[in-house]
Image (cartoon, rainbow, N blue to C red):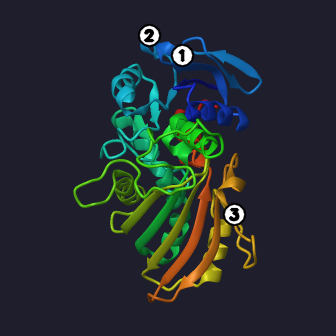
Amino acid sequence: MGYKVVVCGATGNVGREMLNILAERQFPVDEIAALASRRSLGTEVSFGDKTLKTKDLDTFDFTGWDMALFAIGSDATKKYAPIAAKAGCVVIDNSSLYRYDPEIPLIVPECNPDAIHDYKNKNIIANPNCSTAQMVVALKPLHERAKIKRVVVSTYQSVSGAGKEGMDELWDQTKGMYVPGQEKEPSKFQKQIAFNVIPQIDVFMDDGSTKEEWKMVAETKKILDPSIKVTATCVRVPVFVGHSEAINIETEEFLDEDEARDILREAPGILVVDKREPGGYVTPVECVGDFATFISRIRQDGTVENGLNFWCVSDNLRKGAALNAVQIAELLGREVLKKG
């Protein structure tokens, strides 16, 4: 016996990826519905070897459905998630709307699976920010061993994190560099993204950080440990898919780089590729389409007593969004609903 599953926002980048991953991981589905806004009504999307026609989110009845994976942004989620939850359908939301609500669990299954039981508070589970998700997967096993005091992270985030418009803008601006008359001014991003990097993701806050940076701080504390100090600099780079992060940690106990490498090799969801030779690391191009979070460049930081540096790369449309949502669905089914 399987589950009745809804994917909301099925025509977007993340929604399509949710459908792909549900099929790839052979999630026990008895029935599936692909929902979209009225303007996308009837659009066909793939689910394994099946083709689904999208249904109207506005008129859909969630009664009798087990779980709904939402990838429709905060504004639409604010309207439709309470409707689904009230109808008895557990919402797994990819937007930022519910991440900081103390009554709603924010889950990365490799890190805090026990929090799944808190879904009962509002029948809603939050999926973390893409840059946070891959980072905490790497931090969790190191924190268990040596207790992380402080994290300094610089992110190199792909344009797919800004949706289809971001990907289109990079493509159009790149073409415009070579084809006269096709130049494109920035519209999605604050400055030119082609052949450039932009040290701003989301809006600025009063303390000078951006909201994306604030999200990484708040979410890491909620998922892992409120005592961890985090400072982040988030940068948009001209890469289509795949987020990269340079992470520096300071721990309470000394952690040797070789032991850290061994710990990460054994940790769930992680693949270590760390050869100290040219090309002995993973780049975003190589992680596209993969489920894993890749760790490279593990080394001691001699500027502090107990410091480590490492490089972290993951497909942001997968672990940073759709994969983590599906893993939450798997966890929910395995630990709570117990149908599949």
> Disc 3, disc 1: CB below 8 Å?
no
Q: Residues within 10 Å of mark 1 (few under 14, many from 20)?
A: some
Residue at numbered disc 2: 59
Q: Is residue 271 left or right of residue 306?
A: right
Q: Is residue 11 left or right of residue 115?
A: right
Give the structural element (helix, strand or loop) at label 1.
helix
SS for tag 2? helix
Q: Earlier in the sequence, mark 2 or mark 3?
A: 2
Amino acid at dot 2: Thr
Q: Cα distance, mark 2 to mark 3?
A: 45 Å
Q: Which residue is mark 1?
A: 40
Mark 3 highlights which residue?
282
Type of amino acid under label 1: Ser
Could you tell me if residue 190 is visible in this image? yes
Q: CA distance from mark 1 to mark 2?
A: 14 Å
Quadrant in which residue 287 is drawn: bottom right
Percent across and percent down for residue 148 are 44, 74
Front residue of 296 and 202: 202
Give x and y (percent) for residue 51. Answer: 71, 18
Q: Between marks 3 and 1, how big is the CA–CA gap?
A: 37 Å
Label located before the other in sequence (1 or 2): 1
CB of mark 1 within 8 Å of CB of mark 2?
no
Q: Nearer the viewer, residue 110 or 232?
A: 232
Circle 2 or circle 3, nearest the eye = 3
